[in-house]
């Protein structure tokens, strides 16, 4: 299992976070998405080893108008 942490510049509401989590979980090989309550800008995404997955996550976020940065991989 691999994981990446993504920082999103935008501040998200509860409904936006829930929708974003569903969108990311729909990406093949993603197994979990965590959004800590104490930090509204970070998402931790767990995934099965797959070489293009971090790029797919960023592409998905950008296509929805977000400005993400990978902070750890």
Image (cartoon, helix red, strand yellow):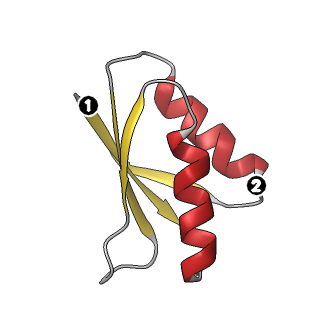
Q: Looking at the image, how many numbered discs can be counted on the residues?
A: 2
* Picture residue at 65% right of the left edge, 50% below the top: 61
Q: Tell me the tag on residue 64.
A: 2
* Picture residue at 33% right of the left edge, 80% below the top: 37
Residue 31's place in the image compared with 44, above or below, is above
Near mark 1 (Cα within 10 A), the count class, few <14, some 14-19 or many ≥20, is few
Q: Secondary structure at mark 1?
A: strand
- Label 2, label 1: how far apart the Cα atoms are: 24 Å
Q: Is residue 46 left or right of residue 51?
A: left
The C terminus is located in which quarter?
A: top left
- Residue 26 appears in which quarter of the rendering? top right
Near mark 2 (Cα within 10 A), the count class, few <14, some 14-19 or many ≥20, is few
Horizontal and vertical percent position of residue 65: 77, 59
* Picture residue at 46% right of the left edge, 73% below the top: 41
Residue to which mark 1 is pinned: 2
* Picture residue at 35% right of the left edge, 79% below the top: 39
- Residue 59 appears in which quarter of the rendering? top right
The answer to whether residue 45 of the structure is visible from this angle is yes
């Amino acid at each position: 299992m691999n994981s990446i942490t993504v920082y999103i510049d935008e501040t998200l509401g509860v409904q936006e976070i829930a929708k974003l989590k569903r969108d990311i979980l729909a990406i093949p090989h993603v197994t979990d998405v965590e959004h800590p309550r104490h930090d509204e800008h970070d998402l931790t995404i767990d995934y099965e080893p797959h070489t293009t997955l971090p790029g797919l996550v960023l592409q998905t976020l950008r296509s929805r108008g977000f400005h993400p940065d990978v902070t750890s991989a």
